[in-house]
């Protein structure tokens, strides 16, 4: 692991640092950490940069597996000139990163879907509340109005009251929509990632 920490900024084509090593001299753990570190740096939201989507980050990493168009063979004796056929990242490691990323996305989908299922149960309860509310508003007799009002009270939970339950209902609806969009976007990311080639 120490070798990985020391050499994870080295690049297969010799353009990395601190020593400008090439593929044959870079420990495998350094090559692994390089790809993981690059992925983390690209997808992490920082104060000085905007967020990059998962599939877009992987596209950047794929680009770094190809030989650089900027490298020129002006110095035929340099290590870089001898390794212009290499990219910065090891393609085999990038392929493994794809699998890890897809598994991570699938876990996020699973966790978010569980939350959506919980919200769905709450929305179902609120639909019953709204049925009682509608019947209460249409009722002509006071005893019928009180009956439906008591039905609403029975369905309320925790910090919900007759004064705030409609705003809580709206919060549940918004949370459901947001999480559903997240899951749909994550499924789309997986589709895009599966089409990417290293």
Image: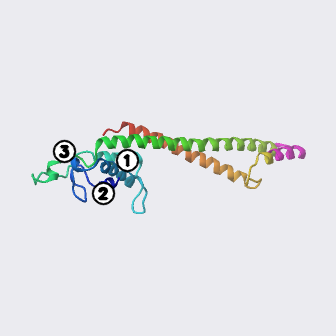
Given this view, does label 1 or label 3 mark the residue nearer the observer?
3
Q: Residues within 10 Å of mark 3 (few under 14, many from 20)?
A: few
Percent coordinates x, y for residue 134 in the rendering = 77, 43
Q: Secondary structure at mark 1?
A: helix
Percent coordinates x, y for residue 106 in the rendering = 48, 40
Q: Which residues are magenta?
A: 138-151
Q: Which residue is mark 1?
A: 56
Q: Quadrant of residue 192?
A: top left
| Residue occupying image coordinates x 39% and y 37% | 194
Q: Residues within 10 Å of mark 2 (few under 14, many from 20)?
A: some
Most distant residue in the front direction: 2
Q: Secondary structure at mark 3?
A: loop
| Residue occupying image coordinates x 74% and y 41% | 128
Percent coordinates x, y for residue 91 in the rendering = 29, 42
Q: Which residue is mark 2?
A: 6
Disc 2/disc 3 C-alpha distance (Å):
24 Å
The residue lying toward the viewer, choosing from 47 and 104, is 104
């Amino acid at each position: 692991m120490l070798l990985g920490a020391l050499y994870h900024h080295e690049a297969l084509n010799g353009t990395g640092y601190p020593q400008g090593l090439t593929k044959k001299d870079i420990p495998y753990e350094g090559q692994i950490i390089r790809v993981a570190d690059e992925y983390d740096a690209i997808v992490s939201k920082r104060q000085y940069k905007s967020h990059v989507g998962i599939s877009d980050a992987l596209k950047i990493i794929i680009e770094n597996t190809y030989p650089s168009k900027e490298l020129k063979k002006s110095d035929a004796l340099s290590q870089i000139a001898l390794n212009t056929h290499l990219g910065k990242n090891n393609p085999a490691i990038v392929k493994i990163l794809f699998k890890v990323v897809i598994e991570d996305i699938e876990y996020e989908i699973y966790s978010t879907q569980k939350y959506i299922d919980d919200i769905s149960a709450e929305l179902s309860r609120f639909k019953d509340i709204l049925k009682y509310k509608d019947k209460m508003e249409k009722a002509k007799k006071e005893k019928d109005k009180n009956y439906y009002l008591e039905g609403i009270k029975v369905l309320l939970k925790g910090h919900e009251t007759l004064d705030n339950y409609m705003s809580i209902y709206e919060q549940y609806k918004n949370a459901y929509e947001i999480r559903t969009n997240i899951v749909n976007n994550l499924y789309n990311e997986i589709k895009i990632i599966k089409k990417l080639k290293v």
